Image (cartoon, helix red, strand yellow):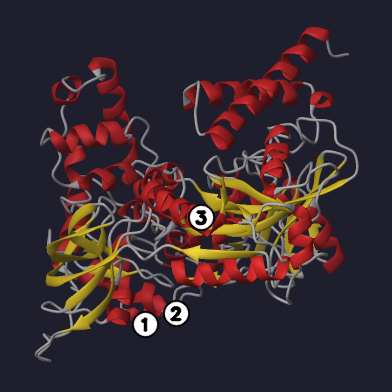
Amino acid sequence: MISERVKAEAAKLREKIRYHNRLYYAEDRTEISDGEYDALMQRLIELESRCPELASEDSPTHRVGSQPLSRFPSILWDPPMLSLDNVFSAEEFGEFDRRIRHELKSEDDPVYSVEPKLDGLAVALIYQDGVLLRAGTRGDGSDGEDVTPNVRTLRSIPLKLSSDLSGNLVVRGEVIFRKNDFQKMNRDRESRGLELFVNPRNAASGSLRQLSSRITATRPLSFIAYGTALWPDGITSQHSLFDFLGRLGIPVNPYNLVCRGAHEVEKAYHKLEQKRDEMPWQIDGVVIKLNEASLQAKMGTLSRYPRWAAAWKFRAEEAVTRLIDIEIQVGRTGKLTPVARLEPVFVGGVTVSSATLHNEDELLRKDVRPGDMVIVRRAGDVIPEVARSLGRSDSKRGKRFEFPVNCPVCRGPVAREEDASAHRCMNPSCPAKLRQSLFHWGARDALDIEGLGSKLSEQLVDKGMVGDVSDLYRLSRPQLASLDRMGGKSADNLLSELRNSLSVNLQRFITGLGIPGIGRTVSGLLSGRFSDLHKLMRADVDEFLAIEGIGPVLADNLYRFFHEKITRDVVNRLLNAGFNPKGSGTDDGDKPLLGLTVVFTGGISIPRSEVRIMAEKAGAKVTGNVSERTDFVVAGPGAGDKLRKARELGLEIISEDEFLRRMIGDGGN
């Protein structure tokens, strides 16, 4: 029996969280810090976990995502979600306005709703009796993708409307990234060594259309409503519709305007163009609609466009300048980014003297070369980029830029990741990435050195105590104790952790080196093939290619890492520090699960990361999805979709105890 006090606390927490969501997403303001918000959410999660009866479908805690889908179901739109016709100048909008007045047979200036045109992904939300039922993308206008599980993870979308509402309501709007959320997400991705998103629009589309809603839940998406499929009872204009949606708790754009006649619309267009940089989200124009519902109905629609609305795009924020040179910047994760050095030019409200060229693929596609005249673009919160080359007036272009094979900072080997456009320096001791290398070396999947976090890694590098990964093993107690927030006891604990890490196995050692594309899974394959590090270092490309799961790119990266002097010297210094990591690749007879594919699902008493390593050491390949290629499934309490699919496919399903028996070669007999 849940006490009334606990019920009241849970209800109050839900109310507070919804209130702060609405402040942030609908009113663009905050009253509490991120930490205070997280504390409210954590307390509600704690209460609902302790008392499952408290949980409800509209609880803010139900935004973490669910099991991945194999594909998106279809969702049909009636009436269709139409596109908008475009106008590109005041003269063209004047023609649109004259046609409106002519067909309405009115001499009075029409009243228009002028709305910032958000640059995201069009989505519709279906509410039944005030509760979010389904959601989908626009698709081709009539047939979209049902992305309900993903949309439910967006904090800006109310799962239950704030006013009692009966019947069906279909709200249409745009899923976007707010500028600050997009920048924060990219900073986080950079710190974790992940590819950065180039622009908010593509990132929003890709994030919402993930087959795993758990991935969508990690992306700080927002929703802004711009209309409904059908006019709600009593609503007669766009202006009153926005007021109505706002009262329901659905975010609408606070910059929407009501204008009379073409002259006021043109003034509003220029006003919003001037304000675009200060808006919290990216816009690329304005949408102009007849304000009155009755007049929209009178104008009607064509097969693709409503005849009562148009989109007037802003002029591109571009400028022409000369590209002086192309340089390579090395980021904190070792990623190499080509950067154009430019003759300074004023664009998008700022003076730009450098602009990103993103990666080698973009560099080749745009074919920009030193000395070229180039178009530089800056839109919204996107960093300045070179849009394209105009060549040279004398037709004497320079040579194509060749991407370096060695890091410009340390001269270490550079590798391109498999199935990715990024190039990274392979040297763990490269000064540009040393802080990140130390943090990665101590990470849980690598050497699991407790206490070697990002802050300590920064201190060690900034104070000159560590110039190479192997220098960690030469640190003294007085050195460590002198650092901020360390002291004698913390220094002793870290030294003990470092000593213990010397006995790490080959899989963790390889993972810790941070070779591009070589994570825990591939390191496990290498550990299963080679009995020690010395044999791995002597291997050639063909030996790597013979391992299932390692392709030409990874094989080449591995060979270069262990044969080029700079990176080989790093490994030798670690060996001199006391490492002698061993693999499990000694005898196939010691691998009872050799060649088998295993899936774990449900509650397993052993931590999932550890049981995976156990299975891989025994020769198994561990995957996250059940398929016809799966040999058996280890199912624990609470197993769901994977267990059902395994049964449908007629796969062997075993318990954790049976799995452990097979690990020691009993075969279940």
**Residue tagged 3:** 265
| Mark toward the start of the polypeptide (1 vs 3) | 3
- CA gap, disc 1 to disc 3? 67 Å
x 76%, y 53%: residue: 293
**Residue tagged 1:** 542
Please tell me which residue lies in front, 404 or 238: 238
**Residue tagged 2:** 546
Q: Is residue 119 visible?
A: no
Kindly state the secondary structure of the residue where label 1 is placed.
helix
Q: Callout 2: 10 Å neighbours few (<14), some, many (20+)?
A: few
Residue at the extreme front = 107
Image x and y of residue 384, in percent: 28, 59
Kindly state the secondary structure of the residue where label 2 is placed.
loop
Side of 249 relative to 288 (left or right): right
Quadrant of residue 627 in the image? bottom right
Contact between marks 2 and 1 (CB within 8 A): the answer is yes
x 10%, y 78%: residue: 371
In the rendered view, tell whether residue 533 sits above or below residue 130.
below
Image x and y of residue 58, in percent: 77, 34
Q: What residue type is labelled 1?
A: Asp
